[in-house]
């Protein structure tokens, strides 16, 4: 599942860059903190998959679901304010894609172990 580890690392980098972009464009220090911490956590967990795979993959899944929920919450606020839903919408799509890939990786791995 090396490909999935690379997906999670890329997702972590995207979160870091998104937090930096939110800080620069929106003057939001919270974007920098949340994006940076979630991104670094995802990268660290991806690197831990070799040593403690069960804990790392479960935590990655929980964190990804948490980020998905956060972006749905942000989308509701953006829509109420009459602003463009592009940023939270794209993040929802990305989080859902990563979570779907995590689920695919889990079930394909489980199927391979049964055979």
Image (cartoon, rainbow, N blue to C red):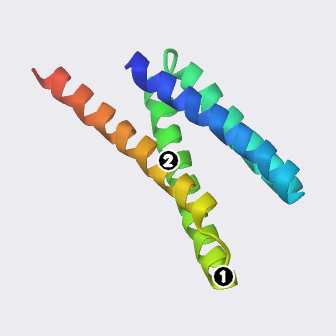
Q: Which mark is residue 94?
A: 2
Q: Which residue is mark 1?
A: 82
Q: Position of residue 72 (x, y in %)?
A: 54, 67
- Mark 1 Cα-neighbour bin, 10 Å: few <14, some 14–19, many ≥20: few
- Mark 2 Cα-neighbour bin, 10 Å: few <14, some 14–19, many ≥20: some
Check the picture and name the quadrant holding the C terminus: top left
Q: Position of residue 52 (x, y in %)?
A: 50, 22
Quick check: 96 above or below 20? below
Q: Which mark is residue 9?
A: none
* Side of 70 relative to 30 (left or right): left
Residue 82 is drawn in which quadrant? Answer: bottom right
Dots 1, 2 in contact, CB < 8 A: no
Q: Which residue corresponds to the image point at 78% horizontal and 46% vertical from the top-left?
A: 21
Q: Which residue corresponds to the image point at 88% horizontal and 53% vertical from the top-left?
A: 29
Q: Position of residue 45 (x, y in %)?
A: 59, 29
Q: Which residue corresponds to the image point at 38% horizontal and 37% vertical from the top-left?
A: 102
Count the labels in the image. Answer: 2
Secondary element type, mark 2: helix
Secondary element type, mark 1: loop
The outermost residue toward the left is: 115
Of residues 57 and 70, the one nearer the viewer is 70
* Side of 67 relative to 21 (left or right): left
Q: Earlier in the sequence, mark 1 or mark 2?
A: 1
Q: What is the spatial separation of the Cα atoms under label 1 and label 2, in whole angstroms? A: 22 Å
Check the picture and name the quadrant holding the N terminus: top left
Quick check: 50 above or below 66? above
């Amino acid at each position: 599942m090396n490909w999935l580890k690379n997906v999670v690392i890329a997702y972590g980098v995207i979160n870091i860059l998104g937090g930096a972009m939110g800080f620069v464009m929106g003057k939001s220090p919270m974007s920098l903190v949340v994006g940076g911490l979630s991104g670094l956590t995802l990268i660290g967990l991806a690197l831990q998959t070799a040593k403690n795979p069960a804990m790392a993959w479960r935590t990655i899944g929980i964190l990804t679901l948490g980020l998905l929920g956060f972006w749905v919450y942000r989308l509701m606020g953006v829509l109420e304010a009459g602003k463009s839903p592009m940023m939270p919408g794209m993040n929802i799509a990305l989080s859902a894609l990563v979570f779907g890939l995590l689920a695919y990786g889990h079930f394909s791995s489980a199927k391979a172990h049964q055979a």
